[in-house]
Structures are given as C-alpha cells and as structure tokens.
C-alpha cells in the first residue's frame, strides 16, 4: 500500500491546501488505515461504522488516544524504525508511537518550523527539557535535535539543570544580538526565570506545557504572565504536540494555536464521539479535542484526545483543561 499523503517538501513556501484538498486526503487516509491498520480496523468495525458510510470528515471514527498505551498502532507492514515514548507522568503507563518512516516526522517538523519561524539557520536553539532528556526516546527531543541540526548554530544545545551555563549562554547571545529560541517544559522555565530574571530582547520563549508533578498546576495565562514579567517579554509562545502524533500546532501569543495545513482540530461532544458540531462553525465551540494529523499515516491519523478545547471560526484553538480522570500528558496544556 502507498501512503496517501506526505507533508510538503517545502521550506518556507505557502503551499495551497484548501478544504476540499484536506477532506479528500483525510478520506483517502482513512481508507488506507482501515485496510492497513488492524487495531484501527477492529475499532471501526466494533463501532459498526462501514467504510462505505464514511463520506465526510464528521463520519470518520477517531481512535481514543489511550490505545497507544495498550496496543501497537501501526499501519502497513514496513519495519518499525523508531519508537517514541511519552514522558510517563501517569501510573497507567507510557504511550508508544511506533514509526515506520521517520521522514514523515522530519518533513512535518521542519515544515512547521519554516511556516512559523522562518529559516532555522537564523536561529540559535536552546532546549530546557530535563525530564524528556532523562526519559529518552522523546519525540520532542527528536524535534529539537532536528531543528538544531538544520540551524547549525554552534551554541545550540540541550540543558538538564545547568541553569548557570544556560544563563551565561543567553547573556552571550543577547550581547551578540543573536535571534534565539528557548524551548522549555513549563516547570523548568518557571524555575530558571525565578533564578535568572532579566530583560530578553532577542529571545523567543516557547513553552511546551506540563508541570510533571513538580509544581502546582496553573492555567496557561498565569504561567505566561509570570514569564513575561520576569523576562520583560511581550508574549510567550506555545507548542501543542504529543507523542502519538507527528505534527505540532503553535501559538505566538495568548495560547491560541494554529495548525499546519495537513493538521486539523475538531471539537466533539463529551457524551457523543460522533457529534462534531464544529465542522462548519460560525462561533467558538467548546468540547473535547479530536485531531486529524495527515502526517501520521504510519500509525493513526485520527486521534481522540482527552483535552478540552475551544475552537474558533478561523480554525485557531485553545486548550482549556483536561477531561476528568484522564491522564496528564507531557505536551498537553496545563490543567485547570
């Protein structure tokens, strides 16, 4: 079987991908994964949803994200090249994403960077991701590594708890006027900013969410206000991604995320997984978040999360909490 979709081979280009294109690719991907993914096929069959009945986006069944903990979710017969593991913040086990073609992720994560931040060669990228580095097999660490490799700046690198070294690096980059991206897990950014406040003029701070049980849970606005005050920044950027997917959404301010053209967020009712009233919305709709990630063709492109979100008519969305009794995941946003 041939993968029906591949992220664009573009760096910086705005390739057109309209609603009709997306729907056609999503339906092709659904049929491809129904035929080639035994876990997804069994799930669809149990729901009694015939592939012939799936003609629109709202007809597609979305696989609950917890299946990535209990099953090997793979489409096709190609060998698994890499396994990404979640950060393991819950007692119910880690999610595993078995990837048969890492090029899908490479193209997706690089295209996402280009669309939001331009040429990575203009950036120095610093990653404050202690728990991900300690755990290993992190898709977030892999993403940062690819960005750093593409950028090629000699000062790019990862930091565990070496706050003094990170501070000295930032001071040197600031003095040189070097455009810098500081990517960090939320609790580490809060700890670092508390110890080393000060004005950052050439740094974009991007938080990935999550307290990992290290601090009390806080809403995103509270975290952003603290970081903005300590570093005298106008805005804090955010990344929304997860182990189970191969694409990310980004928010340049206020926690309002935009997806790349091959990724889309839908809102479902809590008590009815097929009630997706926000397909053609003309006002904000709140509910549970379903995600279509067409780059995720080697696993499952249709994932039903436990995040509670609000979707706006322009396609942007925000994460406002978690479903009661659901696991707290690494890159999901801060719970309320």
Image (cartoon, helix red, strand yellow):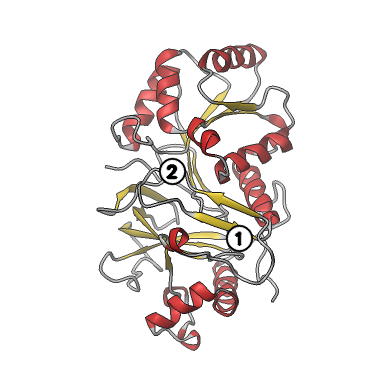
Above/below status of 249 relative to 26: above
* Mark linked to residue 234: none
Quarter placement of the C terminus = top left
Residue at x 41%, y 21% (from the top left corner): 191
| Camera-nearest residue between 264 and 293 | 293
Residue at x 72%, y 36% (from the top left corner): 149
Task: Judge whether residue 232 can be spotted in this image.
Answer: no
Residue highlighted by disc 2: 330
How far is the residue under mark 1 from the one under mark 2? 20 Å
Please tell me whether mark 1 sits on a helix, a strand or a loop: loop
Residue at x 27%, y 64% (from the top left corner): 270
Residue 182 image point, x, y percent: 55, 28
Residue highlighted by disc 1: 295
Please tell me whether mark 2 sits on a helix, a strand or a loop: loop
Residue at x 66%, y 46% (from the top left corner): 110
Quarter placement of the N terminus = bottom right
Which quadrant would residue 228 be assigned to in this image? top left
| Camera-nearest residue between 109 and 24 | 109
């Amino acid at each position: 079987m041939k993968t029906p979709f591949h992220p664009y081979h573009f760096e910086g280009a705005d390739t057109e991908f309209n609603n009709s294109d997306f729907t056609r690719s999503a339906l092709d991907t659904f049929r491809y994964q129904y035929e080639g993914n035994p876990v997804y096929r069994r799930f669809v069959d149990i729901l009694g949803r015939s592939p012939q009945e799936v003609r629109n986006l709202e007809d597609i069944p979305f696989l609950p994200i917890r299946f990535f903990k209990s099953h090997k979710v793979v489409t096709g017969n190609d060998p698994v090249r890499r396994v990404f593991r979640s950060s393991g913040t819950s007692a119910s086990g880690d999610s595993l994403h078995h990837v048969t073609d890492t090029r899908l992720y490479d193209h997706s994560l690089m295209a996402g960077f280009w669309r939001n931040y331009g040429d990575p060669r203009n950036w120095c990228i610093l990653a404050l991701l202690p728990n991900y580095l300690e755990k290993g097999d992190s898709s977030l660490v892999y993403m940062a590594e690819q960005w750093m490799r593409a950028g090629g700046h000699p000062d790019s690198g990862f930091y565990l708890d070496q706050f003094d070294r990170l501070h000295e690096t930032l001071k040197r980059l600031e003095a040189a006027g070097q455009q810098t991206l500081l990517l960090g897990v939320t609790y580490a950014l809060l700890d670092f900013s508390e110890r080393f406040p000060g004005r950052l003029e050439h740094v974009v701070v991007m938080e990935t969410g999550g307290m990992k049980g290290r601090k009390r849970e806080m809403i995103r606005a509270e975290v952003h206000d603290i970081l903005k005050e300590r570093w005298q920044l106008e805005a804090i950027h955010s990344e929304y991604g997860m182990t189970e997917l191969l694409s990310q959404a980004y928010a340049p301010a206020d926690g309002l995320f935009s997806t790349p053209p091959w990724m889309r967020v839908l809102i479902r009712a809590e008590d009815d997984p097929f009630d997706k009233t926000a397909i053609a919305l003309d006002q904000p709709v709140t509910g549970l978040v379903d995600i279509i990630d067409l780059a995720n063709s080697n696993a499952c492109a249709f994932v039903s999360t436990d995040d509670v979100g609000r979707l706006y008519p322009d396609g942007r969305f925000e994460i406002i909490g978690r479903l009661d009794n659901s696991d707290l995941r690494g890159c999901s946003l801060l719970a309320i």
